[in-house]
Image (cartoon, rainbow, N blue to C red):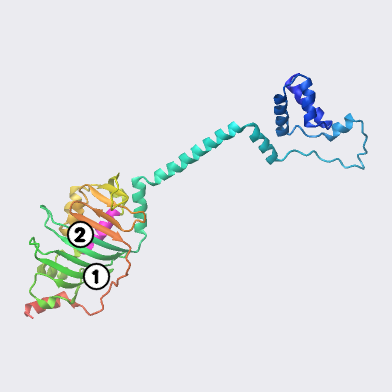
Amino acid sequence: MSDQVLEETIIRLAQKKHSRAEIIRVLITEGYEAAYIEETINTLYYSGKLVSDVDSVIKNENIHTIDAMVEKKSEETPSLLFRANVWMRLHPIKIILWCIVGVVLLGGGVGGYIGYRNTPIRVITRMTEYFRQIPLLSFTIIKNANTDDYAVYSMQGVLDSDGRISATISFNATKDEQTKWELDAVRIADGNIYIRLKRGPLPYAFLYNTWISIKIHEENTDQEILTTLGLGDLPQYLSIPRKVQSELFLPQGYQSIVLEPKTTTCPSLYKIVFSHPSGQEVSFIDGPLGRVQALFTTAPWSLCVTPEYVPLSVSSQNFSAAFSVPTIIPSFTIDTPATTLPTLMEWIAEDK
């Protein structure tokens, strides 16, 4: 008996209301093995073929009906859940293989995405995007002396997206490291500056601990006076935080970014080489700001990125900078009247 004949025999016996056991017993007498009969019956159930055909039963039993009085019921097919359950029992090995393939593909996709997000350029890009959205940043910048550049300065304060800055600054007056300027400074949005000297090399007591207004954009008069007093580089010092910020937060300015082994103080440490501008571009910048520009053309720098991005710290051999979100928002104004630089020069001339 062929497989098709076997299936037709099983269907016919089922339609005649024979039980599963009776069908198997009849077919065993036909020479089929019990296991093969069971498998064929399950396959027929899964395919939906083993359903009682009412019309065939009526015809085979010679039962007459009146179609106008008796509504013929539609054929019922096994539910999708039932058929899926039968199929899974018949093909357990395929189910296992498909599950393994699914887990491998899902794991590979997730792993690839995580790997892409954690590449150095993506980490730094997310960091810069985060900092560009912050309206206020606290900063601490320190420059130590080396054999080629005597400049030593430190600055700590807050800057905002409008160019305003409030800071405490300390820097060398000359190559003599014992002579320093120490002052508080506020730069408002139009670029004008207020300073309060706390320490310096000039022997005029009335210069100190009073607010002085400096108008940078008035025909260089105040700039000339600053130079006379030894504070000619002060406007450039106040531009350093913004310069450092712009260099750090522009990924296109990086020539290379390499992830370094983490340390006890930094979970994600990167070695950064900044793109080198042409010598002509650097030569136009003089004073402290020019020295900062030169610092960013040397390699390498170490950049520590925390999971929250704050605080952010960067350092080279003799320069370090850190940025964070300020806990106290400063006032970018002063609360007392300020003395103008020309007035101070009159006092100096009168030897007050």
Q: Residue at x 17, y 55 (%)?
A: 291
Residue 117 x %, y %: 40, 46
Write down the residue under mark 1: 186
Choose the circle earlier in sequence order: 1 or 2: 2
Whether residue 223 is visible, yes or no, is no
At mark 1, the secondary structure is: strand
Q: Amino acid at mark 1?
A: Val
Write down the residue under mark 2: 142
Tell me which segment is drawn in magenta: 238-248
Q: Is residue 121 magenta?
A: no
Q: Amino acid at mark 2?
A: Ile
Q: Residues within 10 Å of mark 1 (few under 14, many from 20)?
A: many
Q: Residue at x 27, y 69 (%)?
A: 190
Residue 338 x %, y %: 20, 78
Residue 340 x %, y %: 17, 76
Q: Is residue 241 magenta?
A: yes
Image height check: is 47 above or below 79? above
Residue 293 x %, y %: 20, 54
